[in-house]
Amino acid sequence: MSELDETDPFVSRLDAPTLRAARERGGSAVVVGGAMAGLAAAHALRALDWDVVLYERQSYADKRVNCGEAMTDAGSIPLPKTPAYGFANRPPAFEVHVYTGETGARTLAGEGVFPSTDGYVTDRNVVERRWAEQLAEQGVDVRESTGVRKAQFRAFSEEFDLVVDATGQPSMASKVDGTTGEYAGRMTALNADVEGDFSELYPNSRILFENYLGYAWAFPKSETRANVGIGWAEDKLPDDYYAAFVAACERNDWPVPDRSAMNIYTIPRGPSLDPERTWDAERRIARVGDAAGVANRFTGKGISQAVESSYLLAELAARNRLDDYPEELYDRMKNEYRLAYVVRGALEDGRPDILGGVMNAVSGIDVEAVDREPRHAFSRLVRHPVLLAKLAANPTMLSRLLDAYTDDWEYRKTAETPTRS
């Protein structure tokens, strides 16, 4: 590999002396889980000239993955941004609409338009397949259609310098430890690709909050094809998932997908895992992405967060500072966690007027900057005294603000205390 390839989204994070020293040291890693977080970890560690083995239990050729298809910060993914690599549409903006309810009598409580400088709506299965192919060409031992048993996972700590757990929630490390209940803050979602007329929305994308504990979305890939979906917090699930999804499609004039075309999956809302659990120094096991509980608490957006966690892990490996991973990861994410946690209080409290007001206030900020640089959102909010007065008068919002700034997150309240089995 080149001395310092500034076009590589991971290598460009390192100065030449650090990269050279890391490559001279070398190392070996096994990455368990070959979705976006695992692919990013394999890419970054291979860029350090580590020997890397990647396990993915499914076949990339047959894998049907269409959750997380709207990706922001796409420049962190080292692939050409073309349809052949899964990047179907580059939306100029993501629209957010907040409604007072989910019936025909609903009214619009507020809306925001968030420009997207580096976001794409993707065919995620294609993105992952092409990235895995690229990694294999670069020397990563990609073992697709190969699951990992718990006994095998335990043995990895004796075979490799680093074990990267990218298996989602609950993670393989949790299964091995017998602590699968240690995660908190999950959402359940349904989605599907549909054919229809999306010319009115395309090329933009849209997220809808309709005064239930969740949201719906339409991410057009072209004027005639889109990914549509709906999600709910796990403590507020509908009695009939499919009927609720159909109703959301009908009231928003989206094509109704066949039941056979739908996916159901879990979206984490971070931090849903105790940050200290992201790194096991004794066994050299690091969790990344969903396995580490990193995702946006408000929207559930987690692809850019997953990639960032993997790149951060490899960057610390290059600097021989892996023990700093939990603190560094939390420091990178905590402001995003705090803003999302506070704003989400309006949704949980059934206050579309407050949520709509927040969207009106922060409209115009880049969609990725809303997450990564929340100071922009806070600076907008302070310019709206009436909205601030509503926030200050709402007990739920005040309680959440206190929780957020004292790090009193849901993971502290989970029933199961992590213990090693």
Image: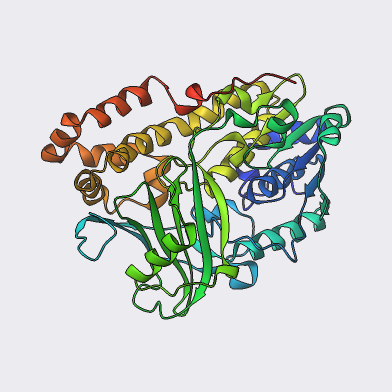
- Left or right of 65: which side holds 385? left
Quadrant position of residue 384: top left
Camera sees residue 62? yes
Camera sees residue 70? no
- Observer-nearest of 55 and 6: 55
Q: In the rendering, at what x and y percent does residue 194 appear?
A: 51, 74
Q: Is residue 307 above or below residue 66?
A: above
- Residue positioned 29% across, 50% down in the render: 211
Quadrant position of residue 246: bottom left
Q: Is residue 217 above or below residue 386?
A: below
Q: Residue furthest front?
A: 239
Q: In the rendering, at what x and y percent does residue 238 appear?
A: 43, 51
Q: Is residue 234 above or below residue 367?
A: above
- Residue positioned 32% across, 68% down in the render: 251
Quadrant position of residue 183: top right
- Observer-nearest of 393 and 285: 393
Q: In the rendering, at what x and y percent does residue 301 appear?
A: 48, 48
- Observer-nearest of 121 and 136: 121
- Left or right of 327: which side holds 119? left
Q: Residue furthest left?
A: 386
- Left or right of 170: which side holds 231? left
- Residue positioned 67% across, 59% down in the render: 128
- Left or right of 303: which side holds 350? left
Q: In the rendering, at what x and y percent does residue 257 appear?
A: 50, 72
- Residue positioned 74% across, 57% down in the render: 132
